[in-house]
Image (cartoon, grey):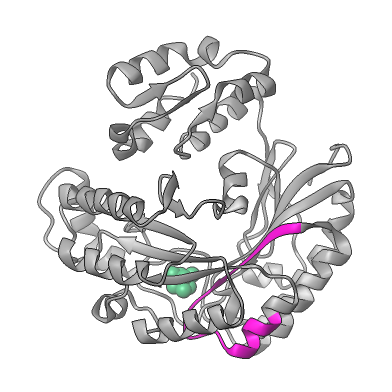
Amino acid sequence: MPETKKDSGAECGIYLHIPFCVLKCRYCDFLSAPAAEETKEDYVRVLLQEIKEKAPAFQNRTVTSVFFGGGTPSILKAGAISNLMDQIRTGFAVSDDAEITIECNPGTLTREKLAIYKGCGINRLSMGVQSADNAVLKMLGRIHTYEAFLESFELARKAGFKNINLDIISGLPLQKEGDYEKSLKKLLRLRPEHLSVYSLLIEEGTEFYRLYGEDAKIRENGGKPQFLPEEEAERRMVHRTAALLAESGYQQYEISNFARKGRESRHNLGYWRRSDYLGLGLGAASLVDNHRFHNTRALDDYLKYEFSPQEEEVIDKKGQMEETMFLGLREIRGVEKAEFYRRFGVSMRNVYGKVIDEMSADGLLMETEQNVCLSTRGLDVANYVMAAFLLD
Ligand code: SF4
């Protein structure tokens, strides 16, 4: 891990990975798996030690966001989460208004857990609901029904959580556009503060890959898949999502993220703006003073207190410029020219004038005096546009 040279007052986020789930969902390739209670307890012990050992290097930082992700962090006993939060506060200077999020899955939340989360300062919940349609939830291999989610959501509101995100997936096998819209509308009636809506990606190594891998290849090549929606239908779902959410008072602030005013995720904005963050726990990635590294992804090694940085990479100025553009373009406001100049001492146009002109001429980018951002058409082919910002 690099020695942090930041002056007092520098900010950073903290991510804690909890790699356990009740069951593995059929589409999921995250670093997560079911585990015995004893393994979870050992894991928390190691994680507490990792926090203790790594915190001193961050003495001068103010932590503005903490994110418990997974996996299913809410699978742990609530006491474990509050112990982890205590250790974070002991080791780091957490700002009074820090955004502190925990990912929870319906079926793992209780009134008692929510009260303990509240008591240790957690102020944002991110709930993986994925769909309001029970047939879809079953097909995804989720452990909960819509009714179970509803119960968890209501418990969370009663416990006083006023900032809740819902994760939703579109473009699912056999999903009809009308059914997707119905499900989305049902979830919108709950008036969550934030929604993350992702199109399904068929990832290698998942059960879905075995079932629908061929279909995914056909879709990628513009053919007519058998089970997955065709690319045009999938795009229509994405457009309909944006329109419905805009009508319902949400602002799209990132390709897949929508929020009520002031409820954008501070932690995730940090990723797209290349702010520093320290990842703790199995496989967790970090960006600190332009060093990228991650922890071991082998649970056995981690449980032997192996949490030294792996594959540390120093991002040079060229890499920093590339990342600034392709991560920044994920935000709807795009990349600010003044910020680019402040960071690199050179104007964005000097470095990227040609690609900005070409992409703008194709209607994929929009440029103003202040910033450069994806156009509506550019949003549909965001990966293609972003790739053009890689420097030779
Ligand atoms: S609950 Fe989330 S992390 Fe766990 S298996 Fe399902 S999708 Fe993956």
What's the magenta region? 97-116
In the image, residue 237 above or below residue 306: above
Tell me what residue is drawn at x 41 percent, y 86 percent. Answer: 148
Nearest to the observer: residue 281 or residue 248? 248
Tell me what residue is drawn at x 22 percent, y 46 percent. Answer: 220
Asked if the stretch drawn in magenta spans residue 385, the answer is: no
At which x and y percent is residue 311?
Answer: 66, 46
Nearest to the observer: residue 204 or residue 70? 70
Residue 176 visible here = no
Asked if the stretch drawn in magenta spans residue 108, the answer is: yes
At which x and y percent is residue 34?
Answer: 52, 81
In the image, residue 367 above or below residue 196: above
The quarter of the picture where residue 292 lies is top right
Left or right: where 21 falls relative to 132: right
Tell me what residue is drawn at x 82 percent, y 72 percent. Answer: 86
Report the number of numbered marks.
0
At which x and y percent is residue 176?
Answer: 15, 65
Nearest to the observer: residue 176 or residue 224? 176
Left or right: where 47 falls relative to 168: right
